[in-house]
Amino acid sequence: MRLVERAVELTAITAAFDRCRTSGSEIVVVSGAAGSGRTRLLREVASVVSDSGALVLAAAGSPAETSLAYGVARQLWQSAGIEQELDAYLNQAGPERGARPDERICSELLDRIGDRPTLLCIDDVEHADPMSRGILLHLQRRVGSRHVLVLLLAGESAWTTIPSFDAELHRNLPCQRLRLEPLSHAAVAELLDVPTTSARAAACHYASGGNPLLLGALIADGEHSGADDDGAPPAPAAQFKSAVSACVHRGDEALLAVARCLAVLDRTPSQRLLRRLLRLDAAKVERSVAELTRMGLLDTYGGFRHPEARAALVEATPAAERALLNGRVAELLYSEGADVTAIATHVLLSGELNTAWSAEVMVDAAAEALRSDRSTVAADYADFALRADLEPGLRAAALVTLVRAKWRIAPSAVTSHLPALRTALRAGQLDTRGVESLLSSLLWTGRFDEVLEITRGDVGGEARPACGSGAQAALLWLEFLNPSVLDGTQTDHSPDRHHGDLGMRAMATLVCAVRQKRVTHAAAAADAVLQNCERADPLIETVLAALLTLILVNELDRAENWCERLSSDFRRRGLISLTAVVAAVRADVSLRRGRASVAVREAGMALSMMSRASWGVVIGYPLGTLIAARIDTGMLDEAENLLRRPLPPELLDSTFGLPYRYARGRHALASGRPYAAIEDFRHCGAVMASWGVELSTLVPWRIGLARAYAALARADDARSTLEDQVKQATGRSAFLGAVALRLLSSLDEADQCLPLLQRAVGVLENSGHDREFALALAQLSNEHYARGDSKHSRTVARRAMEVARSCECEAETRELLLGGEQFDVADLLGENDDHYPELTDAEGRVARLAVNGLTNREIGQRLYLSTSTVEQHLTKIFRKFNVTRRTDLIGMLRAEPSNAVPAARLPMSPLTSPQKTPGNPPNNAEYPAAADTINVLLH
């Protein structure tokens, strides 16, 4: 590192030496904090003086040699080449040494100097032994008429430790004092070779405090790690930590002790606390803190400028000493009534719980950390407190805090604590939060029978524990998870009765939505619950229940908005499990809207946040969404791999097993195994029937079952299933009825086909199910085309493609439109038909009409082209396919069907009606037996 800001000092010292050549001896004293560049400056001065031919005599003090008599003097004599004379005198005994030793010792050195210009420099003079300081004072009284510059370098506060020596320096020779200030911001920028406005220069200047030693270490660490000069300051590594250690070890024992104590205390110290802790007088503590500040290690508030500087000092402190120091700090902080959080940090680091107050502090600090969303810290504090012999109530409080903290991060980590929670429950030591935590954990892992035992009081034949509202909320959640387990147990479904209990309101609202009670108020009630979940500490199932309510009542916009708000809040607060659950709901919403690739990403992210064990029985929800989204994106192999994952045995006995079963059925259908698909879809319906609930909004099993029947060409069974879905959806999930109507319209050539599709489009338009809306529009466009209404067909097709582009189902919608042989809307699809990549868009449209038997004139009328233009297109087409007749072209263009859309996403081909053309209007076949129900929907 270049001496950027030491040129002034260098010039001042060389100027003093030049004066000594003509005017006599002088003294220059240079002071500065450790690492400020004193030694580098001395070497630079010595080099300049030596090059001029002058004599240079150098020595340096050391803390390790302060008690060594004549240690510094010996170095001076050695540099003058007369060390043997000094040794000879010092080895003499008795009266031969004489009465004036300083004069006898110095005479040889003075003879060696003579009249030559001489630089006599001593670094770290404050560490010189007393005998050498006496020699130095004797010399400065004898060199006044000679040409000697005495250059002394010392620490910032050195002269306060040896005031008599400092006072004596001024008595005989002119004495000039120089102080090495920290490097300025501009100097740091110059050293880094970056503009002064650079953020890196500012960061490095602050981190080093302008200390050249620390700055150089930072730069060296950055070069070693390949840090970008335009970025942030390099992360401190080995050299920076070594520089920090070097700075503090250059001071006295008090400085080192204060530095280590400050590192242990972090940002909670006061000088009074330091004095009590180290048993030092105020002056020493104040001087040491000031010196550490001048070194650039501390800021003006007494905290370390860089956390790695503190870490270096903590690491350098022996473990036993560190633990003892933390224990003493904790005691002092407790005696002064400090905040429990500050005390708990040091109790934990001390590794001991020797007093009753220390365990209580840890329990209180754990609860405080949990309230401030420091879940990991709360778990550490509570776990440490439980190692002590706590009284039962305090132990139960610590246990509940530990469970709630772990539940936020990884619910599976709570399992080992459930027996202890049940024991505390039997003893009546759990509060409402504790009961909630116990029951929530048991339900999450599918241990439904144990929940019933607790809520009914059948726990080992003992008295019924006071579970309160926590038990009621658990029973409502259990009613959603598996109503059959309740076996007649009555639950309160009215959300209005539970204004003071967030969990109860959420669960009651969800059950009402499932039971089709008070559905019109469900969305507002869910909103109220979720508003109270923001910046609060809700249970996972409370948030999940409220969001699922919005899904069940088809409020997708609200659900999506809440997912965005809650995800941002929970992620910021580090609530991993809640963030994961919200991501799972958001994935479901994306899938329902038709954004399958987004659903894949969000469901995958949700599953990656927590382990399979931490998801418990709820894993069926995000896993089912991910499998279904993989199917919709054509990734059947990836979906199959997901189906091979092991699952908790309790999953398929819970409501969250239904999305998994439904997704498995969809995969079987897409893989060409319709019988396996039928079994899974029927199972979903049978489970709902046995529970007496209707969850088709969550799992549209009838739609899947109808598709499976259609794949087996069982049109009557498919029709019957869809009609059943239409009946079930009346007054409930209208969008499912609309989907069923869309598929029913493909079964027959009934006169009601067009109004059915119009009704389906009307319902789906504002339902939020964009994919289904786009497909319904495409079918409606085809129906208009089949009835000869080209104008409406093009209008609806254009709208279908607009919606399809917004929900990632362009290919599916395009395939459906092209399947209707709508060549007059081909220009709306944005690309040439996938069947004929060799042809231009215009050629592709002409070719499709030609192979369907239209004459050149008819093609021209259909496409608004002249007959000659059609002939030119056909000539180019024949040339590209190397044919001469239309009959050859027909065989070639119809040879290979398009595979652009995965089979799983195609409209049900068995449910698609025969080809309709403008000249072939639909017949008047009678509509099936469910016409009355459909008429109700239409009117």
Image: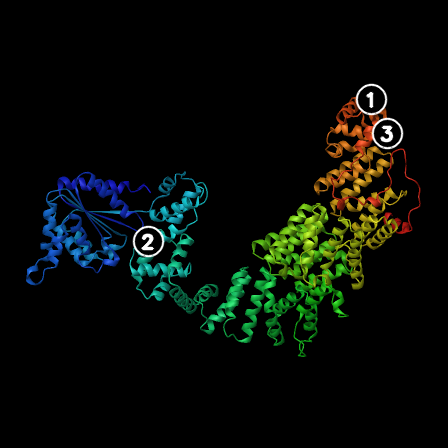
Helix, strand or loop for disc 2: helix
Comparing 836 with 937, the one in front is 836
Q: Nearer the viewer, mark 3 or mark 1?
A: 3
Q: Earlier in the sequence, mark 3 or mark 1?
A: 3
Q: Does any portion of residue 293 appear in the rendered image?
A: yes
Helix, strand or loop for disc 3: loop
Comparing 563 with 322, the one in front is 322
- According to the picture, the residue beneath numbered tag 2 turns out to be 247
Helix, strand or loop for disc 1: helix
Type of amino acid at the residue the image marks with label 2: Cys
User: Alpha-carbon distance for marks 1 and 2?
Assistant: 94 Å
Mark 1 crowdedness (10 Å alpha carbons): few <14, some 14-19, many ≥20 = some
Q: Quick one: quadrant of the N terminus?
A: top left
Q: Is residue 835 left or right of residue 65?
A: right
- According to the picture, the residue beneath numbered tag 3 turns out to be 853
Task: Using the image, determine if residue 257 lies above or below residue 53.
Answer: below
Quarter of the image for residue 521 reads bottom right
Type of amino acid at the residue the image marks with label 1: Thr
- According to the picture, the residue beneath numbered tag 1 turns out to be 867
Labels 3 & 2 near each other (Cβ < 8 A) = no
Labels 3 & 1 near each other (Cβ < 8 A) = no
